[in-house]
Image (cartoon, grey):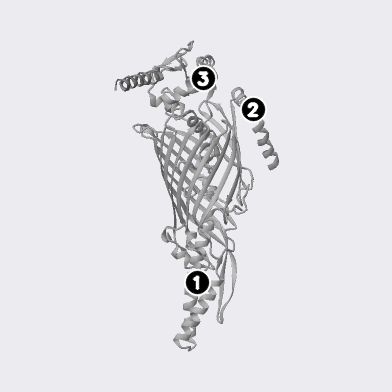
């Protein structure tokens, strides 16, 4: 089936655009699509689940949509979409959006079905290469590994235009998530760190007290407690989620394009979602004679609140576009029952910001640049807490990305892009067995895309 | 000095020639069912960006675009976007399901015929286009 759809796309790209437009004219059914193929390579290490060190073509996306207006004010449509982003996507087709849209008046319209999530300026169009200068959006705002959480909501929504240049969009329903989402993988790491610390302290105290009861000298009892605490901590392991189920999800967006400042727009967007996951958690067996191995139990972990707030500003003047965005993600897990013991997991705040500029010099050439900064835990910005864990590096706490990008419009339908990234940081980076990973590295990407 | 003065005056005159007719070259036309006699620039921009979808009597707006030379002029004058930016804007709408690309016409005559036959339709043509069964909208 997958091959048939890909073949269908290839055939479509060979059909003259006029023929598709003609179908549009006669049937009132709009058919549009896009397909892109990229190549990505880094000078060292693998990035974001892609084998970038060797260079990879697992870097593509495609989508096709149909829409029509069966009655006055009513529009229905759907888009199917597939992508390959290293370990993610693998060209499996999914319904990207599919909804009915009824425009009651200029101030109010309703939508029902699966709608895109408005987050920041560009989340809704993040998969469409043709609508921006760069190949990759700043990861500080648009985390590729979290796309599943931010892609869409199945439910109902409302939208409209308000006086003075304001517009709004609301959606309520069930979101999406996959076990590979970065949010959940990061959460499992935090859970493991937290659990290890708690169990180590608890076991050390318990064995020390036991030794004292048996009449051991205080110093010896303390040393025994420390030894057993360390053994207990070594048994702790929290695996990445084996499954993830999205629950209640809400999304709101407010945009303001002030009439007195042509080309300026402000945007505030908010997303709230609850997620249920299952993780294998290994805890030590504490026996009277000491720590005796560990037991792995499949555990339900409910993420009470994943909320994202993005504030953005964009200014367009002539062929130049400037933008700045700030992103805050908050992950609240609350209490997790581990072996019957409630364990409190601290809230994590993930912060990112990015600034970008692009300019179109001719109808066929555009140049752009952006800088993004991303910290995976605001309470540990310098990574010192992370570094205190054996085998971890402080640079895993962040990723700073300076990108220079070029876009060549071969014609209205074909686009070719080249870009380079200077990276600092190791978040989302796999450095293999390198005992001393270099936090400074480079990434190169190119992509060709077709849309109609 | 005299040379410079002549150059400045010539530049101003040329600037005048190129700038002033910009508004004059584009004529906004609508179907006779449209009650509006005039629209301000903001309304025209909102219509062609799909933000204003209803006329004040709540009937649907059906806007169309042109592929003639007047298109670039229209975008510059009323929409404040280049044709690339306008195309990109509609790509975003189409690929998020928020809108359908407007119908577009290769000649003024075809566009005028469509507007004259379609309730709630609005479009733009060059000032020297032969108008028939449509009304002009002042801005």
Which type of secondary structure does the marked residue at label 1 adopt?
helix
Distance Cα–Cα, label 1 vs label 3: 74 Å
Q: Is residue A1 visible?
A: no
Q: Do the numbered discs 1 and 3 sit on residues whose CB atoms are within 8 Å? A: no
Looking at the image, is A137 positioned above or below residue A287? Answer: above
- Looking at the picture, tell me which residue is in the foreground, A238 or A341: A238
The residue indicated by pointer 1 is A199
Q: Tell me if mark 2 has few (under 14), some (14-19) or many (20+) residues whose alpha carbon lies within 10 angstroms of its own.
A: few
Q: Is residue A197 left or right of residue A78?
A: left
Q: Residue A349 appears in which quarter of the rendering? A: bottom left
Q: Tell me if mark 3 has few (under 14), some (14-19) or many (20+) residues whose alpha carbon lies within 10 angstroms of its own.
A: some
Q: Which mark is residue A268?
A: none
The residue indicated by pointer 2 is A16
Numbered disc 2: what chain? A
Distance Cα–Cα, label 2 vs label 3: 21 Å
Q: Tell me if mark 1 has few (under 14), some (14-19) or many (20+) residues whose alpha carbon lies within 10 angstroms of its own.
A: many
Q: Nearer the viewer, mark 2 or mark 1?
A: 2
The residue indicated by pointer 3 is B68
Which type of secondary structure does the marked residue at label 2 adopt?
loop
Which type of secondary structure does the marked residue at label 3 adopt?
loop
Q: Is residue A255 visible?
A: yes
- Looking at the picture, tell me which residue is in the foreground, A365 or B51: A365
The residue under the point 69% across, 37% down is A7
Q: Is residue A313 left or right of residue A136?
A: left
Looking at the image, is A114 positioned above or below residue B48? Answer: below
């Amino acid at each position: 089936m997958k091959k048939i759809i890909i073949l269908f796309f290839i055939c479509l790209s060979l059909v003259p655009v006029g023929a598709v437009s003609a179908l549009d004219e006669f049937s009132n059914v709009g058919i549009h699509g896009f397909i892109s193929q990229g190549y990505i390579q880094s000078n060292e290490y693998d990035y974001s689940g892609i084998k970038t060190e060797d260079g990879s073509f697992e870097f593509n996306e495609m989508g096709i949509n149909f829409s029509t207006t069966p009655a006055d004010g009513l529009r229905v449509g759907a888009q199917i979409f597939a992508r390959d982003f290293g370990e993610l996507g693998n060209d499996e087709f999914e319904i990207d959006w599919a909804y009915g849209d009824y425009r009651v008046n200029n101030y109010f319209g309703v939508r029902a079905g699966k709608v895109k999530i408005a987050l920041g300026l560009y989340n809704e169009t993040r998969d469409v290469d043709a609508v921006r200068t760069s190949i990759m959006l700043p990861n500080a705002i648009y985390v590729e590994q979290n796309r599943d959480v931010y892609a869409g909501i199945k439910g109902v929504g409302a939208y409209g235009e308000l006086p003075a240049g304001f517009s709004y969009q609301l959606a309520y329903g069930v979101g999406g998530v996959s076990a590979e989402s970065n949010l959940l993988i990061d959460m499992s790491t935090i859970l493991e760190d937290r659990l290890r610390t708690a169990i180590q302290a608890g076991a050390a105290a318990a064995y020390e007290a036991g030794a004292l009861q048996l009449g051991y000298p205080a110093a010896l009892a303390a040393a025994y407690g420390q030894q057993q605490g360390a053994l207990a901590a070594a048994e702790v392991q929290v695996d990445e989620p084996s499954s993830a189920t999205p629950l209640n999800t809400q999304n709101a967006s407010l945009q303001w394009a002030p009439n007195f400042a042509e080309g300026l727009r402000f945007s505030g967007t908010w997303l709230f979602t609850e997620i249920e996951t299952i993780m294998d958690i290994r805890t030590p067996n504490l026996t009277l004679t000491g720590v005796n191995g560990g037991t792995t139990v499949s555990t339900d972990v409910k993420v009470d609140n994943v909320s994202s707030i993005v504030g953005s500003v964009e200014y367009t003047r002539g062929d130049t576009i400037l933008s700045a965005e700030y992103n805050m993600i908050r992950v609240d897990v609350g209490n997790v029952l581990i072996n019957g013991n409630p364990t409190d997991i601290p809230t994590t705040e993930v912060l990112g910001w990015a600034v970008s500029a692009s300019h179109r010099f001719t109808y066929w050439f555009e140049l752009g640049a952006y800088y993004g900064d991303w910290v995976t835990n605001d309470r540990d910005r310098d990574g010192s807490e992370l570094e205190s864990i054996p085998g971890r590096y402080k640079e895993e706490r962040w990723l700073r990305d300076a990108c220079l990008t070029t876009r060549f419009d071969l014609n209205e339908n074909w686009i070719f892009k080249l870009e380079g990234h200077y990276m600092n940081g190791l978040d989302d980076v796999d450095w293999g067995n390198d005992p001393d990973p270099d936090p400074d590295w480079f990434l190169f990407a190119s992509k060709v895309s077709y849309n109609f | 000095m005299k040379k410079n003065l002549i150059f400045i005056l010539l530049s101003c005159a040329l600037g005048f020639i190129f700038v002033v007719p910009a508004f004059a070259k584009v004529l906004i036309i609508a179907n006779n069912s449209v009650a509006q006699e005039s629209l301000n620039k903001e309304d025209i921009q909102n219509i062609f960006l799909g933000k204003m979808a209803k006329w004040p009597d709540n009937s649907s707006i059906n806007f169309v675009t042109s592929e003639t030379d007047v298109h670039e002029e229209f975008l510059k004058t009323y929409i404040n976007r280049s044709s690339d930016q306008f195309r990109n804007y509609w790509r975003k709408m189409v690929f998020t399901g928020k809108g359908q690309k407007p119908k577009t016409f290769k000649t003024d005559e075809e566009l005028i015929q469509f507007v004259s036959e379609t309730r709630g339709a609005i479009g733009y043509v060059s000032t020297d286009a032969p108008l028939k069964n449509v009304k002009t909208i002042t801005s």
